[in-house]
Image: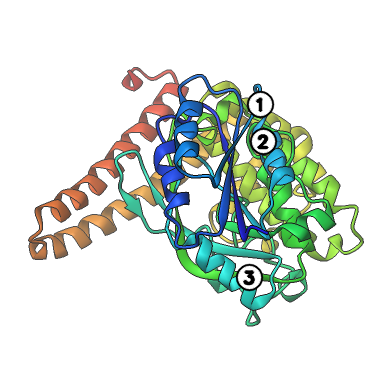
Amino acid sequence: MVKVTVVMPVYNAAKYIRKSLGDVLAQTMEDLEVICVDGGSRDGTVKIIRSFMERDSRVRLLSGNRITTGEAKNRGLREAKGEYITFWDADDRFRHRYLARMAAKMDETGADVAVCGADVFDGAGELYDTAAFLETEKLPDRDPFSWRDMPENIFDFATNNAWNKMFRRRFLQDRGIRFQNLVRAEDTVFVMSAMFLAERITWVDEKLVMYRRYNADSLTGRTSDYPLATYASFVYTREKLAEYPDFPAVLPGFQRRVLKGLLKSLDAQRTWDGYLRNYQVLQEEGLALFGLDTLPEESVPAGMYRKRLRWIRTMGPEDYLLATMRQYRTASEKNRFRLRRETEKNMHGIDDPEERRRTERVLRAEQFLRRGFRKLVHRLHGDERAK
């Protein structure tokens, strides 16, 4: 049996596939297979994969015709031979110790699921540190653990992405865990079901993934093409998890995860139509469906989420957007003051020209975001200053 299977859905990924496949084949663990599931690429992706297949027999290619990302991952899961399995995106990068570290921890603990941290990088190659993908402060004292050790945070200590997780394939088969048939947000039911059903979950406190953000070519970057995908994924996940008698024990944590996910989806929309459709379905049916209309405010994390839940219960879409922009602008002002104060304090001690340029770019990016928010507010009011 192969130790680890890497499933990689691909669609028009020629720009990135060489590096991502290179990361797989450069892993310090050699006992692996990588299954690329193509969804009908037309940009040379398949040709690149075949060139890898000629050099390394561990690379496999499954071809489809415009299948969804969820279908592609399920097909890879059916074809997998590994004891463990992970699902990587073709535009991300992965540390070469990822598979070895995660598999070793699963061997050590007998876990069904392992989770690791991730960094974020952008199109310019800048790497940003973040704890968002693995919040270790929410983890219990025992390792491995299950939802019974942390019912409030079982859905909230990590994101609903599959690429920073490794799964025992037998566990997925025995519990019938599959991806939803969606183009995007297909990971939601898969990850949340695994977290709820796993008897043993472990973690590796290392940033083993470099997640590409602001990629306009990716499905995440084209959120407005599928504006209700996140909402549909949470509806489907709720239906699946509600079948289990223990679900009420984790319901408060599930509601918080849903709230965060739906608000993030609102923020990610790039068109007014996508934003409006999300807002209307959430306000007209989503709040009641997920119990967010009666959720006590004290059960929601203080700060941004609590305020925005209050707003979305009472405001129209335009007023909510303006309130959100003001909230971000206030936070941006505070961050700008802090960044400039720290920069003025420390810039004189930076001798490296590249480090000075990086610091200055951070400030310029922040100023750009502030101008964008200001223009949007003016545009909503028909103000000439938006032009």
Contact (Cβ within 8 Å) of mark 2 with mark 3: no
Q: Residue at x 28, y 59 (%)?
A: 338
The numbered mark at residue 83 is none
Asked if residue 160 can be seen in this view, the reply is yes
Q: Residue at x 9, y 53 (%)?
A: 353
Q: Amino acid at mark 1?
A: Gly
Q: On the rendered structure, is 372 left or right of 88?
A: left
Of mark 1 and mark 2, the one earlier in the sequence is: 1
Q: Residue furthest bottom?
A: 141
Q: Which residue is mark 3?
A: 106
Of mark 3 and mark 1, the one earlier in the sequence is: 1
Distance from label 3 to label 1 (Cα)? 32 Å
Tell which of 272 and 225 is nearer to you: 225
How many numbered discs sit on the rendered protein? 3
Q: Amino acid at mark 3?
A: Met
The part of the image, by quadrant, that contains residue 283 is: top right
Q: Mark 2: which secondary structure?
A: helix
Residue 126 place in picture, x, y as percent: 30, 48
Tell which of 330 and 75 is nearer to you: 75
Q: Amino acid at mark 2?
A: Ala
Q: Which residue is mark 2?
A: 72
Asked if residue 138 can be seen in this view, the reply is no
